[in-house]
Amino acid sequence: MLTILGFAMITTFLVLIMMKKMSPIAALVLIPALFCVAVGQGAKLGDYVIDGVGNLAPTAAMLMFAILYFGVMIDVGLFDPIVRGILRFCRADPMRIVVGTAVLAAIVSLDGDGSTTFMITVSAMYPLYKRLKMSLVVMTGVAATANGVMNTLPWGGPTARAATALKLDASAIFVPMIPALGVGLLAVLLLAVVLGRRERRRLGTLTLDEALATGTDTATEAVLVGARGGGDRLRKNSGGAGAGCTAPGDISGGVAAGGTAPGDEGEAADDGGFKGLDPHRATLRPKLYWFNAALTIALLTAMIMELMPIPVLFLLGAALALTVNFPHMPDQRARIAAHADNVLNVSGMVFAAAVFTGVLSGTGMVDHMADWLVGAIPDGMGPHMALVTGVLSIPLTYFMSNDGFYFGVVPVLAEAGAAHGVSPLEIARASLVGQPLHMSSPLVPAVYVLVGMAKVEFGDHTRFTVKWAAITSLVVLGAGLLFGII
């Protein structure tokens, strides 16, 4: 019974948010509360929620101060050269921009933290997507899938969990998987090319004038060569107000960038609330650029080396960044207020997710779901348990937390495989296959950072990304089988 209710709860949640019948926060709270009552454990709902909140509180704290930290870094101009560099590489070509998104997300993912990856990637790429009216779900989908492949790094979490659960060496799991993961990254780049070409066909080929190409001002004029006929030229000032052109299936809203609004500290704004990287905004701190760069590198290095818990590092980093860049209290309050919406939205989503995960774990639904899935495997599949593990990892890491999958399911699969001579190392490697899809799971707090900062509905992101991420996972699995890794 708990198995059926567990799947029903997850399905109900996904259907309601994808159909936009409920907001993610409301769905994450109300649906598990109702199902908790349905299984006859309503009296324990408070305990389950408190347990869930306790488990996710460090993540919420990390996200709050990480968003504030990177928000301040955007304000002071740390990422302006990155945006200008990518713009020069992309030449305002939608295909190059999508490929640049995948490359940037993969590179930043080397720090092993999904939230940080999404904050940096969105900070750098969001202005380009909005300026050129590109679909924002393309950005979130490509970034999440690229990060999912890179999430298998030994310090990223899943590999360490698999090693711990099966008492193996993390490097023995990860190093042989590198060729398969490399093929997965190539699949993401190919996906970026396909999606980018689709955006190019929808928008046309865009070329920027010399001033924009040198990165002096992202609000200069652009020449749009129309996609229809290819010969129509529309001279368009991206600094003026204009109606967006939303193509069928595009949810980006297509809002044209506007000029600088009075009292907005010199940031370019549009009617959709977009804040562009205005090179003349009052918050820039060019004299402190190298200090801010060094502080960010030191922060990421400390994260990778695990010198302190990540929430503590970002708390200290945000306090130091505010104090040095904005020594006057009114300026500090203004910066905190400027990023309060993002902080509240993301941290609120994390605490709401705590209700969902708390009920799943506390009622025993997740354990019964795992036992049912393992028990449903035919005995004849025993010698192929590595393949079975790889296939199961795709849906299970989407519907379950990594902790639940690696500590609850993988040991059972490894034990079943061992009875048929399948090495635990093969099981561990196969268990990493589902990570590209896992990074878009509603149970992953980082995905709310991604959709929140990109101003994309979670349901839209899910509908767009799931199929591409699942295909990428299957490509990694196929490469692992082909190379004899799995």
Image (cartoon, rainbow, N blue to C red):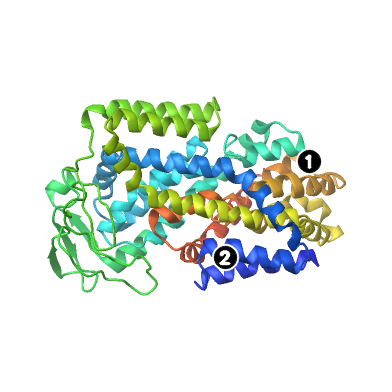
**Which circle, 1 or 2, is nearer the viewer?**
2
- Quickly name the residue at label 1: 423
Q: Residue at x 24, y 51 (%)?
A: 91
- Quickly name the residue at label 2: 27
Q: Earlier in the sequence, mark 1 or mark 2?
A: 2
Is residue 390 placed above or below 308 in the rendered structure? below
For this view, does 292 lie left or right of residue 14? left
For this view, does 212 lie left or right of residue 170? left
Is residue 287 placed above or below 360 in the rendered structure? above
Q: Residue at x 48, y 40 (%)?
A: 109
Residue 78: image location, x then y, percent: 30, 36
Q: Residue at x 33, y 29 (%)?
A: 323
For this view, does 138 lie left or right of residue 262? right
Q: Secondary structure at mark 1?
A: loop
Quick one: label 2, few (<14), some, or many (20+) residues within 10 Å? many
Query: Viewer-proximal residue, 190 or 345?
Result: 345
Label 1 and label 2: CA atoms lie apart by: 41 Å
Quick one: label 1, few (<14), some, or many (20+) residues within 10 Å? some
Query: Viewer-proximal residue, 124 or 12?
Result: 12
Query: Viewer-proximal residue, 485 or 132?
Result: 132
Number of dots carrying numbers: 2
Mark 1 and 2 residues: CB-CB less than 8 Å, in contact?
Answer: no
